[in-house]
Image (spheres, rainbow, N blue to C red):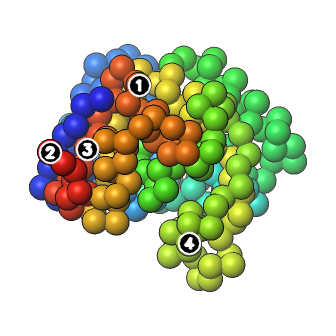
Amino acid sequence: MNIVKVKDYQEMSAWASKQVIDKIKSSDQPVLGLATGSTPEGLYQDLIEAYKNHQVSFKNVTTFNLDEYVGLAADDPNSYNYFMNDKLFNHVDIDPSHTHLPNGVATDLEQECKDYEALIKNTGQIDLQILGIGINGHIGFNEPGSSFSDRTQIVKLVDSTIEANSRFFAHKEDVPTHAVTMGIKTIMESKEIILLASGESKAKAIKQLIEGEVTEDFPASILQQHPNATIVIDNAAASLLNA
């Protein structure tokens, strides 16, 4: 597990953007795993700017997002589908048919999980997976106690995750209680993983990720065992580390 320390959020986003652009340019049919939330917004803005400046094209890129809320349609402003269109896809030359997110309003959610897993497998390995980290160590929506052998599944969100995500909703009670998420085993099969963390609120989680034991009680800890995982942290997120 590689550790990259940067000054601040802007430097973190710029560093990650360069890695994504290099990955796109080094492959004929690059497959990216993408995340949502506030952490990758700077990365996506940098990628849009790079596209506008003719530094990168997304024409041959395929994407798979980590997760989607159960019960929110793709056009719901709080859905992750809407988020990705608003923050990235609508502003670059990516083929919409090559962008994939779980369907949170599928009639048969269990089948949706199987179909999403099959789609990833049939497309080929994810070349580069972008991750954030929850304050409780979740990656995707794989909450503490999730099995390291899990595939794409329906999960119940814990109170701390609902609380953390409530800032995006008008009321806390509007936050969905369940989500479809790519499983930890699926995430770990990515050829390369970059986890981004910024701010003091993530410092405790980063300390446990880097210096703690590998345990299903802290899902992100499994990244210690990935052959090509990089943790990118700003000074605030790194503030509790011993070194």
Q: Position of residue 115 (x, y in %)?
A: 75, 30
Q: Residue at x 41, y 21 (%)?
A: 191
Q: Position of residue 61 (x, y in %)?
A: 44, 30
Residue 142 in which image quadrant? top right
Residue receiving disc 4: 163
Residue 232: mark: 3
**What kind of residue is marked 2?**
Ala
Mark 1 or 3: the one toward you: 1
**What kind of residue is marked 1?**
Gln
Q: Are marks 4 and 2 in contact (CB under 8 Å)?
A: no
Disc 1 from disc 4: Cα separation: 30 Å
Residue 235 in which image quadrant? bottom left
Residue receiving disc 1: 225
Mark 2 or 1: the one toward you: 2
Element assignment for label 2: loop
Disc 4 from disc 2: Cα separation: 31 Å
Density class for disc 1 (Cα within 10 Å; few <14, some 14-19, many ≥20) is: few
Mark 4 or 2: the one toward you: 2
Density class for disc 2 (Cα within 10 Å; few <14, some 14-19, many ≥20) is: few
Which of the two discs, 1 and 4, labels the residue nearer the N terminus? 4
Does residue 98 show up? no
Residue 243: mark: 2
Which of the two discs, 2 and 1, labels the residue nearer the N terminus? 1
Element assignment for label 4: helix
Q: Out of 177 and 41, give the one closest to the viewer.
A: 177
Q: Is residue 11 left or right of residue 34?
A: left
Disc 4 from disc 3: Cα separation: 25 Å
